[in-house]
Amino acid sequence: MNILLLGGGGREHSFAWKFSNDPGCTRLFIAPGNAGTAECGVNVDLSPNDFPAIKDFCLKNDIRMLVVGPEEPLVLGIVDFFKNDPALNEVAVIGPSAAGAQLEGSKAFAKKFMERHSIPTARYREVRNLEDGLAFLKTLQAPYVLKADGLAAGKGVLILDNLDEARAALETMLAGQFGEASRRVVIEEFLSGIEYSVFVLTDGRHYKILPEAKDYKRIGEGDTGLNTGGMGAVSPVPFVTPELWEKTETRIIKPTVAGLAAEKIDYLGFIFFGLINVNGDPFVIEYNCRMGDPETEVVFPRLKNQLVELFRQTLDGRLAEVEIETVPDVAATVMLTAGGYPEQYRKGDRIALPQSPPDCLFLHAGTKMNGDQLVTNGGRVLAITSFGKTIDEAVGKSLAAAETVEFDGKYFRRDIGKDI
Ligand code: AMP
Ligand code: GLY
């Protein structure tokens, strides 16, 4: 079967790498892809948000499966667009409907959904004006968490140390700091604990849990500095004990999937639970309607199941019969970023990329070919994933490989996995 994969980051290279070893995939196309995905299939110069152009491409290239990597086309309704067009009824789509993608597309929607289904999460209030916001902020203690309701390219969450800063930040957000996305703001109680990421694949009724991961979001070592898309990840996560797993599944995963079904929200695809362990109890920090990046770079290398078969079983409502098989080894990924990231950064710097060592995967994020030359094309440039018997061994291999890759401004964190 021919497959079209949407997206162009490290997550999509991980999908493309899985598909390239999958007997169920005949031809793979990636839109827009990067220099890494071009080694697994054919890159197509199309925007994931240009639905009519994607339709055209699918019809001309006998695409039978569309796999959506990033959240934006899902929130914009690509699944509904495909379902509602009879010309596209031979194309199966992996991803939730626009209604389901609201779990990520609107923080206020997600909070109300959790409230309706008694899913543990931080206390909150949704506000549209400064007065209401201030009244609620005064009931909380520092630090203060402000979230733009809509998609804000991962930048819409602000954590403020005191009430004056929180007030000023709220005012700026409501005035449109993140455009329409922050005309509504969710103010939350700050939860103190350690974060972990859990992924499920669901057909809307059944679900299967994939390996968990821990992401490192801050730019600086010791979890300092600005938030990024993610500077590295490890899987499995040692502090996710059987007891925490059990609570995570019964208090969070089950009621989420059951809640979607009860509300007749059409959801087929991945749910990414951004969780926090507060003294042994799991709480939801956020939902995403897609896989994580860079978590996919450690989750998929540990997954033995072939994706095409898994997606077929999901589409056929046969997920209950499926057994998820994982490699027991630890996978760790270290992200190499461009100088300046996550603020202004350069693009177009030449990358000297050696052959990846055995046991190591070079998963491209922001790269492209400029003629014969590999160059940087994003803030996050390359994820280096390695396996080991321990976190230290896996991270050590990725760090050693990171030293061998060269480009101007290269930066990476050397402390991935050191805190767990
Ligand atoms: P989000 O985009 O919702 O994942 O938020 C980005 C980051 O902000 C999270 O990964 C957390 O580190 C932090 N964060 C969000 N909400 C809270 C909260 N209620 N308490 C503590 N930290 C939070
Ligand atoms: N690594 C966090 C995310 O994908 O949103």
Image: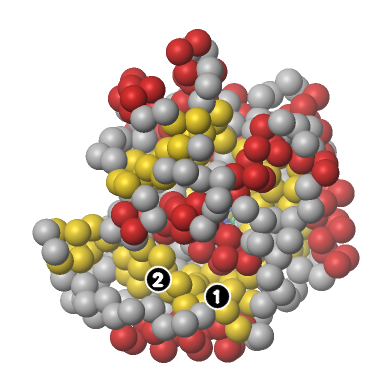
Q: Is residue 342 above or below residue 96?
A: below
What amino acid is found at the position of numbered circle 2 in the picture?
Phe
The residue sitting at 69% across, 48% down in the picture is 200
Q: Quadrant of residue 171?
A: top left
- The answer to whether residue 400 is above or below residue 313 is below
Label 2: which secondary element: strand
Q: How far apart are marks 2 and 1 (CA)?
A: 12 Å
Q: Nearer the viewer, residue 2 or 233?
A: 2
Q: Which amino acid does label 1 sit on?
A: Ala
Left or right of residue 296, residue 362 in this image: left
Number of marks present in the image shown: 2
Asked whether residue 276 is in view, the answer is no
Dot 2 or dot 1, earlier in sequence:
1
Above/below status of 336 relative to 76: below
Disc 2: residue Cβ within 8 A of ligand 2's nearest atom: no
Q: Name the residue under label 1.
A: 332
Query: Which mark identifies residue 216?
Result: none
**Percent position of residue 339, x then y:** 24, 71
Q: Where is residue 320 shown, x and y percent of the image? A: 82, 41
Q: In the displayed structure, does residue 363 sit left or right of residue 370? A: right
Measured along the vertical axis of the image, is residue 23 above or below residue 396? above
- Residue at the location (80% across, 24% down)? 262
- Residue extending furthest toward the left: 371
Do residues under tags 2 and 1 come within 8 Å of each other at their CB atoms? Answer: no
On residue 362, the disc is 2
